[in-house]
Amino acid sequence: MADKLGGEGLIRELCNGFEVLMDKAKGVITIESLKRNSALLGLQGLRDDELVSMVQEGDLDGDGALNEMEFCVLMFRLSPKLMEESQFWLEEALEEELKNAGF
Ligand SMILES: [Ca+2]
């Protein structure tokens, strides 16, 4: 599937979960919204501390929540094979993102 979709489609595919998991009011994924919505993605088996560490692992700017970019990056890290195939343009996308964020 990844081959057919190409880079951009794969990103979209990986980021799809974001909309489902996010706190609609805040526009980010919090531990609470993850807990509330994780069953929709078949993640209901995860314990609270696993959800917490998932957010902590993905939280790059330390605000305690996952924005869309952080979520996508986390999904890549949780999908080693995808990451292998996609590393090049992920790095490009990240570089661009960090530049835009003023790093
Ligand atoms: Ca964050």
Image (cartoon, rainbow, N blue to C red):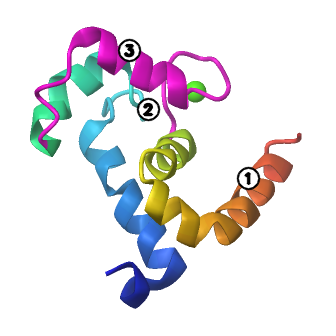
User: Quick check: 3 above or below 16?
Assistant: below
How far apart, in angstroms, are the residues tagged by discs 2 and 1?
17 Å
State the SS at label 2. loop
How far apart, in angstroms, are the residues tagged by discs 2 and 3?
14 Å
Q: Bin the neighbour count of mark 1 within 10 Å (Cα to Cα): few under 14, some 14-19, many 20 and up.
A: few
Horizontal and vertical percent position of residue 85: 55, 72
Kindly identify which residue carries mark 2. Answer: 28
Q: Quadrant of residue 59?
A: top right
Nearest the viewer among 73 and 32 is: 73
Looking at the rendered structure, which numbered label has been put on residue 97?
Answer: 1
Which span of residues is magenta-colored? 42-67
Q: Residue at x 11, y 28 (%)?
A: 44
Which amino acid type is marked by label 3? Val
Q: Quadrant of residue 38?
A: top left
Mark positioned earlier in the residue sequence (2 or 1): 2
Which amino acid type is marked by label 1? Glu
State the SS at label 1. helix
The C terminus: image quadrant: top right
Q: Is mark 2 within 8 Å of ligand 1?
A: yes
User: Quick check: 63 above or below 70?
Assistant: above
